[in-house]
Amino acid sequence: MAATNTVVRPGSTKRSTSRWAPTARKLTPYAFLSPTVIVMLVLMLIPVIMVIGYSFMDNVITNKNPVFVGIDNYVEVLNDPVFRTATGNTLFFTLVSVAAHLLLGLGFAMLLNSPLVGNVTKALFRVVYILPWLFTVAIIAVLWRLMLNPNGVINYILISLGLTDKGIEWLSSPETALLAVTFINIWAGYSFYMVTLLAGLQGVPADLYEAARVDGASAFQRFWNVTLPQLKPIIISMSVLDIIWTSQQFALIWMTTGGGPVNVTEMLSTYTYKLAFSRYEFSVASASAVLILLLTMVLAFFYVRHQKARD
Amino acid sequence: MSKEARFRRGITTAVAAAAALTLITGCSSGAGTDTSTSSGGDVTIELAQWWEPELPDGALRALMDTFESENPGIKVKLLSGPYASTKEQLFAGAAAGTMSDVVGLDGAWVSDFAKQGALADLSTLMKDAKYDDSELASTIKVDGKTQMIPVVNFVYPLFTNDDLLAKAGVTAPPSTRTEFETAAKAVTALGDNTSGWVLPLSSEAPNGIQNDVMSWVWSSGGTMLKDGKPDVTNKDVTSAVDYIKSLNDAGVIAPGSATMKEQDKVEEFTNGRVGMMIDSLSHIDLIRKSNPDLKFSISAIPAKDGFTGERGIPYASWGIGVSASSKHPAESWKLVQFLMNEKTNSKLSTLANAFPGNTKSVPDFSSSDPLFKQAFDIYSKGKPANEFVGLPVAEQLMRLFDEQLQAILQGDESVDDGLKKAQDAWVGEF
């Protein structure tokens, strides 16, 4: 067998490549990350920083030479009674929606996971229950506007059953509008919980239930001591995410009530939108948006902390 | 590491870096785009508007082709979108200095664009082109500068459902407020979910305040302004709001008013659930298509009893302006001039089922709905009125008034208190 003797001359290409190899090795991960980092910078970080900057100016976009006004815009927003109304409405809308999403989602998930229901029935109900999640917000808004119309199906049924003698103005009456939009949001969002919790339920080991049965646990005790603890991480994650998503709900409110009547369904999102695109007060709108960002960041902090604790 | 592996690593690093570079250049290439271009000696100007989707297919492009053949060396690029998108696009363009050369405008936007300095002074362009503006029906000025010319106007008369009114024993469309109230009560009394009148007050699209509320003020020769400033506590507005409240208390307004939008209003009328509505003429085709059996008439909006003056009739315009940042203002003006000439304006108004912005133009009624001819007579006898045109944050003013009107109709506050609050809110916006 002939041995090959390779002579490496000083300054050869190979040595040059070797010299750059460690640098290239170090740079490669960053090069791969760079498209994402640039997208995040351009589409997320820079706009957020710009909006924070705008919130300290007298007005931007419509004003060519804006001047720094400190926290004036924040003071204006916080002193605006409509902002306080919007905060209260958002709180009600979010908390009721999230609680109802959880209860309905868990209830339907347990129903679909029950051995008492046949496979065909399960498949049928799975389709029926998941339907609301398949519609876009625009469809949901139009659908419910038609159904809740004073001359719509819901009122027709109520009148036919003798529960009311004339059509109720569900979305137009200050007494019912907030409840109506909250109901629509609950209808539109419980499916997501249901699907996720169903997956969680299917992952609960059967031997835990068997052990509980052997110990003489009732159905409620099995639910309380086995099902809920097993689903707890999913429930917490879902709830925090849902609070963030629901508190930012804009399209549904805008397309059903527009924040009316008389601000009873005004949310932080619609309030901010009106400031920007109706009053063209982009700086005040930015201040409002930053306040919402801060509230959301508090929730996001708890979510991330919870996820870290899980890991 | 083998030579091959090092080579592969080098290649992948290069590909990743190239991807990042492409992304950067991709993101940056959109900035600072010149909206008008010159190629091969031709000047291309942009016309951003929402009209093309609302006109018959290819109609606006055909007009542009005529313009291009009459003005060699100038090409027109149409940027078309729905009304709301056009508004947002123009605002973004105005802020970034990339507004299209010629822009379709709504009277409600003019003041805000003018405040941004986004629109060119058309008086200067007219002067430079030695244009005689005596044929123009109207021009919209802000701070003494002409910012918009209404190209065509859409009027808002009273629509009445002939069958419902006849069934209720009303033989002719009402001409006075008392007649209107009587007719509305008679139609509502028919039962079966019918209402006399429909009033859209959605705060998402608060133009009901302009078209369905203030029209009662203007039709009786009233005003909501004094020396260009808010004056909604005056007797004209108070009387109109009192009247609307009395209609509401009488239960003749269709339910669901607070969240109803213009399209809901048209739908209620088309389905024969309301006897009367104030609406744009442009919806006649839609109503006929949706319910071919519906028999309806149009008439002037009722005025106060005994009013003999000239009746104001609300209108909305397709207005036009030139961007202050246009690199081709002379060519842009030529396009405006073309759209406003007698022949083109007649054609455009016929196509749009609207009334011309040139006083000499006459729409061709030969193939249009007979109601258009009737509407043109109402329009010619009355006075186009829309005091929101040219006001700052016009949509917000409508929304602020809307909130107070809703509170008044709900019985949460008196007419005087509501109007006082509306006045204060309006003054704040001015």
Image: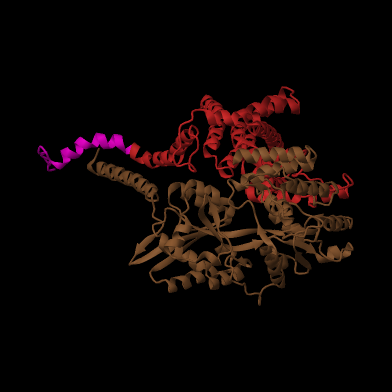
Question: How many numbered discs sit on the rendered protein?
Answer: 0
Is residue A26 rendered magenta in the image? yes
Colouring chosen for the image of the structure: by chain
Residue B43 in picture, x, y percent from top left: 38, 64
Query: Residue sitting at 25 percent across and 35 percent down?
Result: A23
Query: Residue sitting at 83 percent across and 66 percent down?
Result: B172
| The C terminus of chain B lies in quadrant | top right
Q: Which chain is red?
A: A
Residue B344 in picture, x, y percent from top left: 54, 71
Query: Residue sitting at 64 percent across and 52 percent down?
Result: B387
Front residue of A274/B395: it is B395
Residue A308 in picture, x, y percent from top left: 51, 26
Figure check: A150 above or below A266: below
Figure check: B111 above or below A237: below
Which residues make up the magenta segment? A1-28
Q: Is residue B227 visible?
A: yes
Figure check: B163 above or below A272: below
Front residue of B312/A52: it is B312
Query: Residue sitting at 66 percent across and 51 percent down?
Result: B207
Figure check: A279 above or below A71: below
| The N terminus of chain B lies in quadrant | top left
Task: Name chain B's colour.
Answer: brown
Q: Is residue B256 visible?
A: no
Is residue B96 rendered magenta in the image? no
Front residue of A311/B313: it is B313
Q: Is B340 on the left-hand or right-hand side of A160?
A: left
Furthest-bottom residue in view? B366
Residue B100 in picture, x, y percent from top left: 45, 56
Front residue of A190/B69: it is B69
